[in-house]
Amino acid sequence: MLLVPLCFFLALAADESAALLPDGPGKEVTGKICTECHDTANIRKLRLPRDQWSDKMDEMVDRGAKGTDQEMAAVLDYLTQNFGPDSKIYVNSAPFSELKAILKLTNEETDAVLAYRKQNGNFQQWRDLLKVAALDGKKIEAKKDLLAF
């Protein structure tokens, strides 16, 4: 009896997760295909080159991910563009796992960023992150070129 509400909740969470992906060509199909089995947090915390994204997608296809060749090519392009080694982190939509992994923050620092963002709204520039009391400003300054708002 709990299966239907649980499935609805998981589908809703996946939709919300996909909506927070960076805008660009391939966003919709990436959200559709990738959130069939998981939310986007795992994707967002990785920064892989194209060949490794391709390998990761092959693993997902082996596990049941479905899409046309054209859709899969669009997903690969999207992942490479937005989550490649030199890709920016979208601070205002990044979930806990992405902020922590990419910015090398502690759990406490990551929680503080999320709480500050929730209470004060979106950050406008990297220096706004320095207003987060629990955050080590040197970590943010070192990663400022990776930050997008």
Image (cartoon, rainbow, N blue to C red):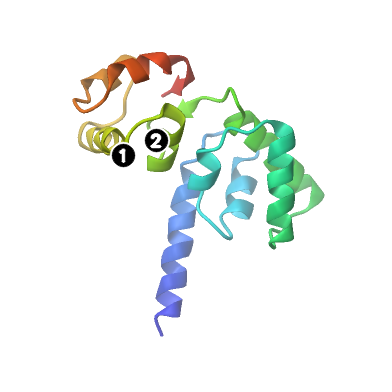
**Quarter where residue 36 is shown:** bottom right
Q: Which three-letter amino acid code belongs to the residue tagged 2?
A: Lys
- In the rendered image, the vertical position of residue 69 relative to residue 64, given as above or below: above
* 124 or 50, nearer to the observer: 50
Vertical arrangement, residue 88 with respect to residue 14, above or below: above
Q: Are marks 1 and 2 in contact (CB under 8 Å)?
A: yes
Residue at 47 percent of width and 71 percent of height = 7
When asked about the image quadrant of residue 109, the answer is: top left
Tell me which label, 1 or 2, sits earlier in the chain. 2
Which residue occupies 64% across, 47% down? 29
Q: Quadrant of the N terminus?
A: bottom left
The reply to whether residue 125 is in sight is no
Q: Which residue is mark 1?
A: 107
- Residue 14 image position (x, y, % from top left): 48, 56
Q: Quadrant of the C terminus?
A: top left
Give left or right: position of 87 versus 98: right
| Crowding near the residue tagged with mark 1, few <14, some 14–19, many ≥20 C-alpha atoms within 10 Å | few
Q: CA distance from mark 1 to mark 2?
A: 7 Å
Examine the image and state in which quarter residue 126 appears.
top left
Q: Amino acid at mark 1?
A: Asn
Q: Which mark is residue 100?
A: 2
In terms of secondary structure, where does tag 1 sit?
Answer: helix
> Can residue 66 be seen in the rendering of this structure?
yes
